[in-house]
Amino acid sequence: MGAPRDIGTFVVWDYVVFAGMLLISAVIGIYYAFAGGGQQTSKDFLMGGRRMTAVPVALSLTASFMSAVTVLGTPSEVYRFGAIFSIFAITYFLVVVLSAEVFLPVFYKLGITSTYEYLELRFNKCVRLCGTVLFIVQTILYTGIVIYAPALALNQVTGFDLWGVVVATGVVCTFYCTMGGLKAVIWTDVFQVGIMVAGFTSVIIKAALVQGGISTIINDAANGGRLNFWNFNPNPLQRHTFWTIIIGGTFTWTSIYGVNQSQVQRYISCKSRFQAKLSLYINLLGLWVILVCSVLCGLALYSRYHDCDPWTAKKVSAPDQLMPYLVLDILQDYPGLPGLFVACAYSGTLSTVSSSINALAAVTMEDLVKPRFPSLSEKSLSWVSQGMSVLFGALCIGMAALASLMGALLQAALSIFGMLGGPLMGLFALGILVPFANSIGALGGLLSGFAASLWVGIGAQLYPPLPERMMPLRLETYGCNSTYNGTSWMTTTETPFSTSAFQVHNIERTPLMDNWYSLSYLYFSTVGTLVTLFVGMLLSVSTGGRKQNIDCRFLLTKEDFLSNFDIFKKKKQVLSYKSHPVEDGGTDNPAFNHIELNGTDQSSKINGTRL
């Protein structure tokens, strides 16, 4: 291929494409602010009035899950560590099945707005508050990084104005969240998934043309050892092996899909439980498509730069910037296409941020505002929800500004909070799957789960694992026609891969560091979840958990599973109206009957669940 030419820069058309993407998102928000009578109640605003269907919800789940971190991070991950990342396809399948069959039935039949409401129903107020506060802090932190990190990567490669983009995305996001509520969030996400796939495909097609076909790309990857799918090493210390991705990945992602408010809120907004499950399964297809696209992009990156790695040759300063670099390299003759790719990365950001803002508003409303001020009318609650959206939008932009000042620190804080997903999932699993768990067990389990997660997590931040655990593959620069001598590839393997701001260098490595702290990052959640479950069970049994009497609506029952097959028993009308299996004997009393009427019954938080 010879040395790559100078890469292009951004032209007017690219800005036009990018602005168009923001504009369409804003217009969708305005449309849903006024369509169908607007946002009458806080339920309309936060839950889409519980009248959504499966497909838009599925695409929305996919979009908010795939942030710009995915668009920029996964290809460079594949470029540096090989295509073993695609084993996540199996993980996604397991995660979706777990979410749809374990967590969804319970949340759906209780008709709750905030997942943390469940914790109070099942345990007590204190447990609920712990969950809520954690969620709010974690989400604001995360959103700040999600806005800032891609802005930085794109800015350094394309010269896109950094703060202009951060503020524009933040403002547009807040705007359509506030105007249109959950419906606007879901429909903008659908549009943004389209943009993301378009951006990816344009890069893949062009790369295949430049390199001479997909087969060349695959051959280059095979020669560079990038097709390392079969790594069945059971050692939990290796960063990515088949087992770490299947086991660790499943726990990590289930804590996002099964119990995270921003995901649960969406599938609860479907009109029937069948639609809710369907949305999760359709979303699986979306996840697979995006995974295949990003892995292909990573292999294309390798094929293009296999003899001249821009990262080692100091053309880009961080692996995140490889993808934008490739785009400007191969798409420079097509004005507007680099803009499409930036729009693609930003669609990822917008969708993640908007779902965070909406979820934060929902949680604050349900868990903090309503219990304090029970007398507020529906109209004023709707106003308060909108105010919350504006407030959280501003907070997230503020966090992005903070991220620019202390990026590495926030990254560390985030990875530490990422570990808190594990114990939280353990807490929900305890409530749903363990009938004898009580609130003492729940709190004890949660705290010990945290302790374990934080111990591993902070340890891994301070003493990052050695390169032979991370297994980066070789990057070569012999093809660059510059003054480098042949040995310069050595430098890449030595750079520490942790972005931690407070690493401790040149210290005697103890067995504790080499084993416990070198645990693959995917297992952090797993440790948290399992510790929470075990401690929770032990404490519950020893504090008389077996004697308590629990309403079986709070547990996963075998009727929940069997009701999947109702569809084959009844006639066609099932789709429009579906009664939940009721075990509390209240079927003859109309106040307790669990049938949702489509859209006619506004207060469709069913009376039966407000016991």
Image (cartoon, rainbow, N blue to C red):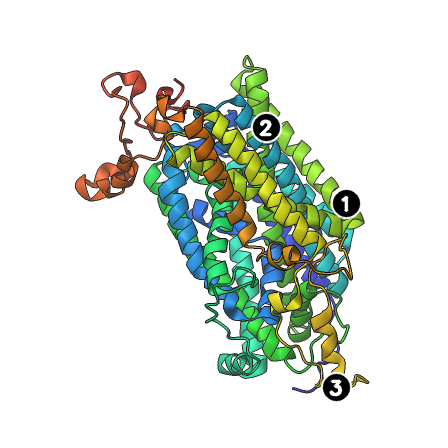
Assign the N terminus to one quadrant of the image: bottom right
Q: Amino acid at mark 3?
A: Gly
On screen, residue 60 above or below 493: above
Which x, y percent locates residue 445? 51, 35
The disc placed on residue 486 is 3
Residue found 59% across the figure and 36% down from its top: 135
In this rendering, would 444 be left or right of 1? Answer: left
Which x, y percent locates residue 321? 69, 65
Assign the C terminus to one quadrant of the image: top left
Q: Tag 1, which secondary structure?
A: helix
Give the residue number, with chain letter if any, for mark 1.
401
Give the residue number, with chain letter if any, for mark 2.
364
Looking at this view, is 83 or 64 the one in front? Answer: 83
Residue 593: quarter of image: top left
Q: Amino acid at mark 2?
A: Thr
Closer to the eye: label 2 or 3: 3
Looking at this view, is 182 or 512 the one in front? Answer: 512
